[in-house]
Image: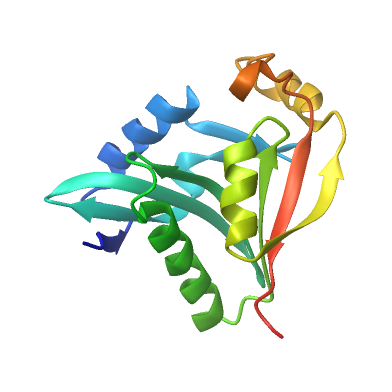
Amino acid sequence: MKPLIVTIDNKNKETVRQLFIDRWASDLIVTKGQKHYFVDLEGFVAIDNDKIVGVLTFKKSNTEVEIISLDSFTENIGIGTTLLNSVVDFAKQNTIKRLWLITTNDNLNALKFYQKRNWTITAIHRDAVIEARKIKPTIPMTGYYDIPLLHEIELEYELIK
């Protein structure tokens, strides 16, 4: 069964903010040297049986949307894909020209997930995580699979063919 997708709004914002903090160790995420605070982000929530089962946040600026976070609290049942499709639909409905995101070099599961859904690696930002630690010192030194956390990988979804 597909979860219900709703926008982050005043009714769910505090609950979603706490989930965001629980997942990311603060209400701040850094990508390409830019600070992204939860309070400034838009997003979608996946709900199943009155429970939040996934969250996607993004930052819209002019004709671009950057996905800041995507969390599925139960993996491999379509929650992440449904949230990702929601932001793609949002981008298409709002004449967005560029939809993109950053992940890190250790996040092999995310790289697999996005590429299987037609996202393309467009850039590697060497040592960007080292620089991000100057802004957010709580970023760990190693990530998934004990891989040193060093670089940001940029992916883009082609909206216009």
Name the side, left or right, on which 136 lies relative to 123: left
- Of residues 93 and 61, the one nearer the viewer is 93
The answer to whether residue 139 is visible is no
85 w.r.t. 44: above or below? below
Name the side, left or right, on which 45 lies relative to 50: right
**Which residue is painted at 54% across and 80% down in the image?**
92
The answer to whether residue 129 is visible is yes
**Which residue is painted at 60% across and 82% down in the image?**
95
33 w.r.t. 157: above or below? above
Instruction: Point out the residue furthest to the left here.
Output: 49
Locate the C terminus by quadrant: bottom right
| x then y, percent, for residue 74 | 32, 40
**Which residue is painted at 75% across and 19% down in the image?**
134
Name the side, left or right, on which 49 lies relative to 132: left
| x then y, percent, for residue 81 | 44, 59
In this rendering, the count of numbered labels is 0
Looking at the rendering, which quadrant does residue 14 occupy? top left
What colour scheme was applied to this rendering of the protein? Answer: rainbow
Looking at the rendering, which quadrant does residue 143 occupy? top right
69 w.r.t. 159: above or below? above
**Which residue is painted at 49% across and 28% down in the image?**
24
Locate the N terminus by quadrant: bottom left
